[in-house]
Image: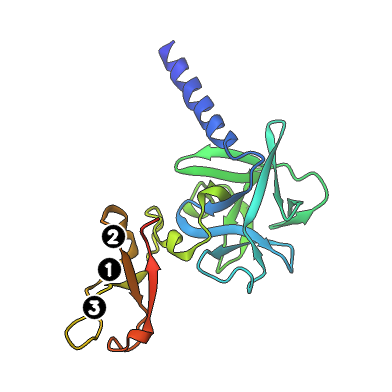
Amino acid sequence: MWQLFCVLYLILGDENELEDFINKPIKIYFAGYGSTFLGLNTKTHNIVARNKYTDFTKHNFEPISKIMKDGSQYEIYYSGRRICKSGSVISQCDANGAWDITRVNFGYTIGKNSSCITKDRDDTVRMKKCTETDDQIFNFKTVSDLGDCDVKDALDTNDKHKIDVNIVPMMGNEDGNVKIDAVRRISDFKNGEMGKEYKVFNKRDNKDPEGLQIADFSSI
């Protein structure tokens, strides 16, 4: 009997976890590629994958989506329209496009009729036989969980991609030149002391104070 309760607990727990993202603006990303989002190419109206460090506007990419429940299945919307399977391609449509969103290890698959949305070569996305591999497993983030600032993205410790910058305390030496203290990862400062203003050295001549920009990290 206790085994049955454990199974029900796991099932209901997974359902509640998915329910947290229903009818909210979200971003869908590949669990195995934490910086790669699923999204809409606004010119072709097809679903593609893009690294979050690319210029979304330049590449006509819309990453924000919404999931709506439809019975035991789900409708996925980008830019106010459903997405549907059309052969091996996923694109916007006006018809019913209900999907199966299934809990698997480390995330969810999104599929229909034993085929799953899959990251293909480069930034293309195709429908392929469900295999529960990294290129088919997704996770979700509500938009409110994501900062619009590139620095906040870099502070995401769950992301495999980090940005190296030069962090320079606001001090000078005897001849008035700025002293470079260290080169560190932004993520290192999440657990450090951030009570002061720091200058971010933008790789110009380290003797040129005009080549420096002030960044206040005290509120992060």
Q: Are marks 2 and 1 in contact (CB under 8 Å)?
A: yes
Q: In which quarter of the image is residue 197?
A: bottom left
Quarter of the image where the C terminus is located: bottom left
In the image, 40: left or right of 186?
right
Q: Let me know if residue 79 appears in the view.
A: yes
Residue 157 occupies which quadrant of the picture? Answer: bottom left
Q: Is mark 3 on a helix, strand or loop?
A: loop
Tag nearer the camera, 2 or 3: 3
Q: Position of residue 61 (x, y in %)?
A: 64, 65
Mark 2 sits on what residue? 188
Which residue has dot 1 on it? 184
* Circle 1 crowding by C-alpha within 10 Å: few under 14, some 14–19, many from 20: some
- Image quarter where the N terminus lies is top left
In depth, the one of 194 and 12 nearer the eye is 194
Element class at badge 2: helix
Q: How far apart are marks 2 and 3 (CA)?
A: 17 Å
Query: Residue at (51%, 53%) from the top-left corner?
Result: 146
Amino acid of disc 3: Ile
Above-or-below relation of 35 to 122: above
Q: Residue at x 59, y 34 (%)?
A: 19
Residue at point 68%, 31% (across, down): 72
> Does the residue at mark 2 contact the one at mark 3 (Cβ under 8 Å)?
no
Mark 3 and mark 1 residues within 8 Å of each other at the beta carbon:
no
Which label sits on residue 180?
A: 3
